[in-house]
Amino acid sequence: MSLTIISSVKAHGGDQRVYSHPSSATRSEMVFSAFIPDHELGLKLPVVWYLSGLTCTHANVTEKGEYRAACAELGLIFIAPDTSPRGEGVPDDPEGAYDFGLGAGFYVDATQKPFAKHYQMRSYLEAELPELIAEHLPVDLDRQAIMGHSMGGHGALTLALRNPGRFRSVSAFAPIVAPMACPWGQKALTGYLGESQGAWMAYDACELIEEGARLPDLLVDQGTADPFLETQLKTHLLVHACKAANQKATIRMQEGYDHSYYFISTFMDEHLRWHHERLVGAS
């Protein structure tokens, strides 16, 4: 599979790159960013996947996430994919809403017209992109971690829950933990998957945990001043689901923090060090 470098800049001794490639899953050109620390030739490094939230592209965390210093020190490759397919012919929300369509793929494989043709983000992230990364970048796919923010937190949780053994650790900032029970999720799941809620369950972290899926370890930070906490994120549902299932989890309410990258960048270093302990300590 082909991979094109759009840009490459030196940072903290490593390389911050942006790549594009044609995707067979989404039938579109996809873009992602990758920070590759300085390393010995031939050495394969652990990889941390970061899934972004509503309205975002790869660029939001790349520009605002403040992850490079920690990744350079710890020897972690940091991969940030896009949140949806884009380009000519890719359908958007007919009313141009921010919470559905472009920038709001919800990391699902859509089954409903006109979205099914392109919105195959689950297949893209579970199969196509990891294969491409392994072919072109010095990643050790036996040492993977995943994290995300908001809609991307939902994506990280559900992707890991559906693929036991793939990720050694999972973390999230302000994740949508129960999309079946919030307006953002209900709109997206109906639009992409149809009315049958049986098809929705594979994309709801709380439902997956209740049905027996488990994570190796989980760290969640949620700001108490987040305007979406009560209506959309519903962190308490994840607390209850993990407690009922004896799922190992550290879920922290961070006083005064909101939903922005000021919040994410504050705790990014800590999350990466937490992942590193589990990626390297278990090697």
Image (cartoon, grey):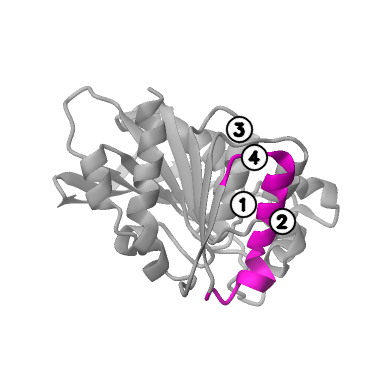
Q: How far from the left and from the top, in percent, is residue 72?
A: 22, 44
**Amino acid under label 3?**
Asn
Name the residue nearer the viewer: 234 or 84. Answer: 234
- Please give the count of numbered marks on the rendered protein: 4
**Amino acid under label 1?**
Tyr
Tell me the residue that label 3 is attached to.
Answer: 163
Residue at the (80%, 55%) spot, across then down: 194
Nearer the N terminus, badge 1 or badge 3?
A: 1
Tell me the residue that label 2 is attached to.
Answer: 192
Q: How far from the left and from the top, in percent, is residue 35?
A: 28, 46
Judged left or right of residue 99, residue 34 is left
Tell me the residue that label 1 is attached to.
Answer: 119
Tell me the residue that label 4 is attached to.
Answer: 247
Q: Are marks 1 and 4 in contact (CB under 8 Å)?
A: no
In whole angstroms, how far apart are the C-alphas of marks 4 and 2?
A: 29 Å
Quarter-of-image position of residue 158: top right
Magenta stretch: give its range: 225-249
**Amino acid under label 4?**
Gln
